Image (cartoon, grey):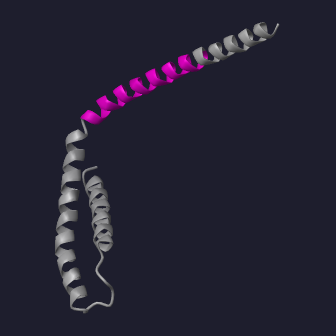
Amino acid sequence: MRNHQLKTTESGYQSRVRNNSFRLYCWSGAWVAARALMGKEISGHKALVFTLSAVGLDIAAGVGVIAGIPFAMMSAFRIIPIHANIGHLVILQSLMFIVSLLYGDRRYR
């Protein structure tokens, strides 16, 4: 009797694995189909998104150089009371990148 109980729990486990695997395949197929449909929609906007990203990165790098060097020099000569840290420059560049993306997106809508 013990073997019989063990076999029924194994078959219950196997049926759950089979059902869960089938659900996983269905969700994976739906995800692939959604990505394919979304890819067709995005492909027309790809050049604009690439251009906006490139311009945003250029602006962020320019602001980093233009603001970063004087900031470091003023900190070295103790003109400003705070110590120049690379984190400040990263924050400034990130904010400028976000602002330039938002401005470009609004401009080309």
Task: Please indicate whether residue 95 sits to the left or right of residue 53 in the image.
Answer: right
Which residue is painted at 28% across and 59% down in the image? 103
Whether the magenta-drawn stretch holds residue 55 is answered as no
Whether the magenta-drawn stretch holds residue 37 is answered as yes
Task: Name the image quarter holding residue 33.
Answer: top left
Q: Residue furthest front?
A: 2
Principal SS element in the magenta part? helix
Q: Is residue 7 above or below residue 26?
A: above
Report the front residue among 77 and 64. 77
Task: Name the image quarter holding residue 8.
Answer: top right
Which residue is painted at 54% across and 19% down in the image? 21
Q: Is residue 57 above or below residue 72?
A: above
Q: Is residue 106 above or below residue 35?
A: below
Total tally of numbered discs in the picture: 0
- Residue 73 picture location, percent across and down: 19, 84
Task: Name the image quarter holding residue 68.
Answer: bottom left
- Residue 47 picture location, percent across and down: 19, 41
* Quadrant of image for the N terminus: top right
Task: Please indicate whether residue 6 sits to the left or right of residue 84 in the image.
Answer: right
- Residue 17 picture location, percent across and down: 60, 18
Report the front residue among 30 and 43. 30
Q: Which residues lie in the magenta part?
A: 19-43
Report the front residue among 83 and 6. 6
Which residue is painted at 50% across and 19% down in the image? 26
- Residue 54 picture location, percent across and down: 19, 53
Task: Please indicate whether residue 25 sits to the left or right of residue 38 in the image.
Answer: right
